[in-house]
Amino acid sequence: MKSHFVLARTVAKLSAYAVIGLGLSACTAFGPDRKPPHIPEPAHYAVESPPAHTAEADGVAQQVMIGARPVPEWWQAFGSRDLNELVAEGLKNSPSYASAQSTLKAAREQLRSQIGENMLPKVDLTFSPERQRALGIPVLPQQTFIENIFVAQAEATYTFDFFGAAFLADRALAGQVRQQALQLESTRRALATNIVVATINSASLQEQVAATEQLVALGEERARQTAARYRLGSASRDEMLASEQDAANAAATLPSLRAQAAAVRHAQAVLLGRTPDNAPVPLKLSDLKVPDSVPVSVPSDLLHQRPDILAAEAAVRAAADEVGAATASMFPSLSLTASYGHGGFDWSTFTSPEGAIWRVAGTVTQPLFHGGALFARKRQYQANYEAAVGQYKQTVLSAFRNVADTLVSLEEDANTLTQTQRAEAAAREASSNTEARYKLGATPFYATLTSGQQYQSARVQVARARAARLADTAALFDSMGDPAQIE
C-alpha cells in the first residue's frame, strides 16, 4: 500500500513538472517579443552638446554634471525650508494623488483576485434543503407527491493551464498594474514639480506686481506733471497726450498681472489640498536659491529612470502577454471536478453513512467554432501590441526632447538673466544720476519720473528672468526621473 502511495505521489510530481514546463515553453512560443524595441541613443541630447557650466548669473554658474545620479528630493536643493514644507504638504494632502493611490490599490487587488481564480483550485461548500410537490409516475394513482431533498457537499474544480493561457493573462494584468504604479510615480513627481513651479511663479508675480504698481504710480505722476506744464505753456499738447497715453497703457497691464498672480496662488492652494481662499503667502524670490549643479543622466540610464518610459515599457510587455494569452486560449484545456457530500430524501438518510454521495469528472475542451471571435480577439491584441510599441518609441523620443529643450533653456535663461540684470543696473544708475541732477537743479522733476519708470520696468524683466531660470532648473531635475523611487 505504501509503495502504491509513493508511486502515485511521484507520478503526480512528474505530471506537475511536465505541466509547468509545458506552460513555460508555451509562454515563450505564443505572442510577440516582450522586450521593448531598440531606439538609437543620441550622443548628446540637444543639437549641440551642453557646456560644462552655464553662463554665470546671480553669482552662480550652474555645473552640468553629465552621468550623475538623479536627486530624489531635488526641491531641497533650492535652499528654502518653506518650499520643502509646501511640497511635503502637497504630497500628503493632494486629493488627486490620493485618488491615484487608491486606483493602484484597486488594481493590485484585482490582480490578486484574477490569480486566485486562474491558478488555484476552486472549493465551494453548498447546502440545499428543498421541499417540493412534484409529478409522480403516470401509472400510479397519485399524480403528484410531496418530497424533501437534503443535499450538502464540497466541490473542488481545477483547470490545468497546459498552454499558459491563464499564466499569460495574469502576467499581462501584472504588467498593467506595474504600468499604473509607474504612472502613480509620474503623478507624484508632477505634483512636486507643479508645486515648486507654482511657488516660484507666485513669488515672481508678487515682485512684478510691486514693481508695476510703482511704475504705474510714476507714470500717473508724470502725466500730471506734463498736464501742469501744458497749462503753464512749457509743454506741448502732443507731449501731454503722449504722457497720458503712456500712463494709461502702464495702468492697463496691472489688472491682468494681479489676476494672474491670484490665479497662480489659487492653483498652488489646490495643489496643496487647500481651498483657494487659504492659499499660502507668497515667498520672496530671493529666498529661492539657484542650485550650483544639476545632474544630467546619459540617455542609456534615462531609459531606466523615467517613470513615463518605464510605464510605456510595461505596456509593451503587457500587450505582448495579452497576444500570447489570446493565442493559447485556442488550444485544448482540461478541467477536473470532484465533489463529496451527503444527501437524502429525509433527515435520517442525510445524516447516515448511506447518504454519502460523490462525483469525479474530467472535461477536455477544444474550441472549434466561436464565430471568428477567438481570431478577432487575437488580432485585436496584436494591434494593441503594435500601438504600445509605437507609444513606447514616442515616449522615449519625447523624453530625449524634454531633456534637450530644458538644457538649452537653462543655458539661455542664464544669458537672459545676465542681460536683464545688466539693463536693471544701468537703469538704476541712470535713475540715481537723474535724481542727483534734479537736486542740483540741472534737470526737471519729470525727468526723474521717466528714469524711475525705466528702472521699475527693468525690475519686472529681472523677476521674470530669475523665475524662468528657477523653473527650468526644477524641470531639469524632474526630467531625470528617480530609479530609487521606482524600485
Image (tube, helix red, strand yellow):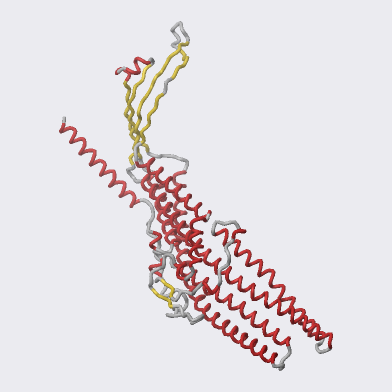
Nearest the camera: 48 or 479? 479
Q: Residue at x 69, y 69 (%)?
A: 255
Decide if residue 274 is in sight here. yes
Front residue of 33 and 41: 41
Q: Which residue appears at 31% of the width and 17% of the height?
A: 352
For the N terminus, the image quarter is top left
Q: Is residue 107 left or right of residue 278?
A: left
**Do we see residue 475 in this rendering?**
no
Instruction: Where is residue 175? Give x, y as percent.
Output: 41, 53
| 156 up-or-down from 357: above or below | below
Q: Residue at the location (38% across, 56% down)? A: 34
Residue 364: image location, x then y, percent = 35, 36
Residue furthest to the top in view is 141
On the image, which quarter does residue 438 sit in? bottom right
User: Who is closer to the viewer here, 60 or 396?
Assistant: 60
Q: How many marks?
A: 0
- Give x and y (percent) for residue 191: 51, 61
Going by the picture, which residue comes out furthest to the front? 439
Vertical comparison of 396 with 430: above or below: above
113 is higher (above) or lower (below) than 464? above
Give me the residue at 72% from left, 93% from top.
441
Residue 350: percent from left, percent from top: 35, 18
Q: Give the image quarter of residue 14.
A: top left
Query: Quarter holding the C terminus?
Result: bottom left
Q: Nearer the viewer, residue 182 or 473?
A: 473
